[in-house]
Image (tube, coloured by chain):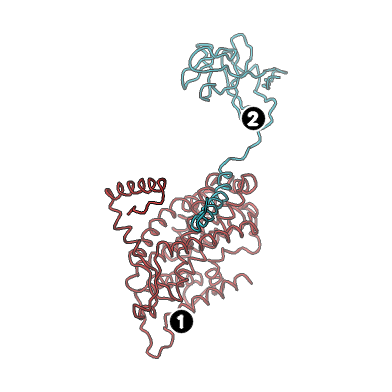
Chain colours: A cyan, B red
Amino acid sequence: MAMTRRGFTKLLLGGGLLGWLGSALYPIISYLKPPEVPEDNVQAVKAGLASAFAINTAEIVKFGRKPVILVKTESGEFRAFAATCTHLECIVQYRGDLKQIWCACHNGLYDLHGRNVSGPPPRPLDEYAVNVVNDEILVSRMA
Amino acid sequence: MATDVEGSGAGSRRGANHRLYGWLDDRFHITPLIEFLRHKYVPVHRHTVWYYMGGVALFLFMVQVISGILLVLYYKPDEGNAFESVRFITTKVSFGWLIRSVHSWSANLMVFFVFVHMFSTFFTRAYKKPRELTWMTGFVMLALVMGFGFTGYLLPWNELSYFATKVGTDIAGAVPLVGNAIKVLLRGGDDVTGATLTRFYAIHIALLPAIFTAILVAHLIFVQRQGMHEPEYVQKLPTERKKMIPFFPNFLLRDTLLWLMVLNMVLFLAVFFPWELGEKADPFASAPEGIRPEWYFMFMFQTLKLLPAHVWFMEGEVLGIVGFGVLGVAWLLVPFWEMKRRPDGRPRPITLIGVAAIIYMVVMTIWGYLV
């Protein structure tokens, strides 16, 4: 295929323009991508005194940057779950009247083992380990 | 007219473009505009090079808008986070160091080219009738550009910018009658604090861009409507001796080439001379040595430093500020106090005034940096 002078010039200029656009856009697009912020390497957090925690209530505990819901059941047992609803990431709350964990956004319900029992949530809540040492509640990641 | 058909592909593409053009033209009557641009010519003579300076300033403004929008994505405008967020941009974000340095360098070059543009229109006397409003909108934009520089300087919240802002707003406070009100309004309180930072941020990224853009559009419409000013000796030439080039594409392509060169210069400076971040501002630390404003405020700063504490019945500082205010207004109104040409062909007084202004600014700036 024969190439005319005009075609050749167009190719050079067009190629140059594309190359320039690439070199201008590459830094901008990389800039837009937020840098990874290292996740806090939290293994366990203290959550107050066990004796001061009322039965059949719950609290949201900060676990690094993640919210965890800490529940004291009627039998006085502590359980902790990731407080982020598996449906659309709202923060769940404990309903003492239902004895279930409830998400206000779309009426999702989880039982006291974190299992999704009704409403839209697709998966159970992740469970955290709770230990009480000298009356101090310790929430930690499941082994 | 889409009559020349190179190949079937090109032909149908042209056809599609033609239909789109027709659709738009039907609704917005763009043909007269296209015709206007097609018949727009730019005079060519030995002062043509100055025609490019406004374009360069415009290009640098566009660089500022783009890099500024990018910076806003990560910048946090409060006392506790501003410095850290700029450090985060320059150390953690990919190419953040580049974007930030480009913004700083391009800002300084923009101020420089705005000054060059202004003095070139001054010395070619392009401000004369019918271009009075082009000159005046340009002067207002110069003031706004300096406002951009002053407010943007504080945003990294480092020692130098903190004290420069204290000094700068204090000087504004010396303006007779309204000074204190201006100072409190600018600072968002009696002192330079986090409130000042938030205010300067709002002024820098919302207030000034909005006003500037509106005036810029007017300025550009004036230029397009009236065409390029020809220096007097070109105006006197017989038509057949005047050289012209079409604005589109000849002049625009030259503009683009120069813009590319300027962009390369900005990138070169940003890569090899990255803008410093300095130390975080501490309102309870003593001012470090060598506090000085940015170079384009230096001639005024140096003048105020040289004035004695009291001149006649006025405070020296007040006299300086009032003086610069009067001179600024006189400069704004240059088109209206046109001076007659001297019969003997010696330089016009107005040209001498311009030369004196440049010499004064250059000498004072250098002096300010030496002392």
Q: Which residue is mark 2?
A: A64
Residue for point 45% across, 75% down: B47
Q: Quadrant of residue A32?
A: top right
Residue for point 72% across, 18% down: A133
Amino acid of disc 2:
Gly
In the image, A79: left or right of A98?
right
Marks 2,1: beta carbons within 8 A:
no
The numbered disc on residue B95 is none
> How many numbered marks are there?
2
In the image, B34: left or right of A6?
left
Q: Which residue is mark 1?
A: B352
Residue for point 64% across, 30% down: A64
Please, which residue is most extreme toward the front here?
A1
- In the depicted structure, whether residue A39 falls above or below residue B19: above
A126 or B219: nearer the viewer: B219
Amino acid of disc 1:
Leu
Marks 2 and 1, how far apart at CA: 69 Å
